Amino acid sequence: MSKKELTADQEQLARFAKALGHPIRIAILEMLANQSCCYHGDMSEVLPIAKSTLSQHLNELKDAGLIQGTITLPTVKYCINSENWNKAKELFGGFFTQLQNTDEIC
């Protein structure tokens, strides 16, 4: 029996899951989902973290493709990346449906 290669969907799902693996990132996504966009400075006034830490979390979400940023000096405006967000919903939905359909889970 040969080893099975990971699929592109498995790799992408893992990347999305890693980006969602911190409560501040979940809070950022919830904030962005409730408005069309948000400026870095506005988020730092609401979230209980330092601006530098916020930047790290925003970069993680951006690197995963879940958000996008537009530079409007002197700040950056962030919003949900709709295309990748829809892909994440599709991948997570399929993943959980597949597991739910398993007859026997240990």
Image (spheres, grey):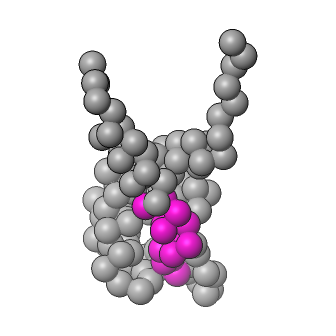
Work out which quarter of the rendered image holds the N terminus and state it: top right
Q: Is residue 64 magenta?
A: no
Viewer can see residue 22? no
Whether 36 is drawn above or below 104: the answer is below
As drawn, the residue found furthest toward the front would be: 103
Task: Look at 65% across and 34% down and name the residue there.
Answer: 6
Image location of residue 15, percent across then percent down = 55, 46
Task: Look at 53% across and 42% down and name the residue there.
Answer: 14
| Residue placed most toward the observer, 41 or 67 | 67
Whether 89 is drawn above or below 1: the answer is below
Quarter holding residue 68: bottom right
Viewer can see residue 76? yes
| Residue placed most toward the observer, 88 or 70 | 88
Work out which quarter of the rendered image holds the C terminus and state it: top left
Image location of residue 17, percent across then percent down = 46, 46
Image location of residue 26, percent across then percent down = 34, 58
Image location of residue 56, percent across then percent down = 52, 54
| Side of 65 relative to 48 (left or right) | right
Q: What is the magenta segment's predominant secondary structure?
A: helix
Whether 70 is drawn above or below 50: the answer is below
Which region of the structure is painted magenta? 77-89
Quarter holding residue 73: bottom right
Task: Look at 43% across and 61% down and name the residue there.
Answer: 89
| Residue placed most toward the observer, 48 or 7 | 7
Q: Is residue 81 magenta?
A: yes
